Amino acid sequence: MLLPPEIQLARLAEICAPQYMAQSNKKTDRIWKLQDAKNRFSEFVEVARAEGPQTVSKHGQSAVVVVAEELFRKLAEKKNPVSFAEFIRRSPLKGVTLDLKRHGAF
């Protein structure tokens, strides 16, 4: 089952953020203001490719992290894709009986 792209990217961010933070190297980490990243986009892209993930801030808050395509593909790679049917079959709630009767004045 494929999720919409925006949900896939959000999920990828949840997965990648801890890995990125664990591999963080304070000497090469760089936080770019959005305007600087826009004005120096070619340099920004080259730094991301050569030195690793680059953070962009907006209004003083981290907004996005830009990574080289190779790293993105590596992190996005599915290790063990499971179909929705298989996911349900493996559920720890398999065999649980639910009370589906309505109670109250509905």
Image: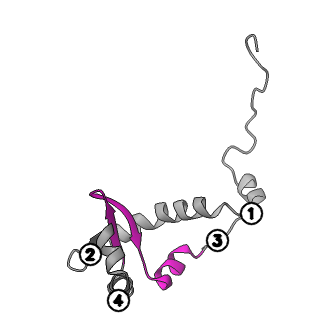
State the residue at coordinates (74%, 52%): 88
Q: Residue at x 62, y 64 (%)?
A: 5
Instruction: State the quadrant of the N terminus.
Output: bottom right
Residue at 58% over, 76% down? 77
The amino acid on which the numbered mark 4 sits, given as a three-letter code, is Ala
Toward the viewer: 22 or 42? 42
Q: Secondary structure at mark 3?
A: loop
Viewed as shown, does residue 14 lie left or right of 101? left
- Image x and y of residue 18, in percent: 39, 64
| Residue highlighted by disc 2 | 29
Q: Tell me where the magenta segment starts and ends, as one range.
A: 53-77
Q: Quadrant of residue 17?
A: bottom left
Q: Which residue is mark 1?
A: 83
For marks 2 and 3, the one nearer the N-term is: 2
The amino acid at mark 3 is Asn
List the residue tagged with mark 3.
80
Q: Which residue is mark 4?
A: 50
Q: Earlier in the sequence, mark 4 or mark 3?
A: 4
Give the CA distance from mark 1 to mark 2: 38 Å
Rendering coords of residue 96 (x, y %): 73, 37
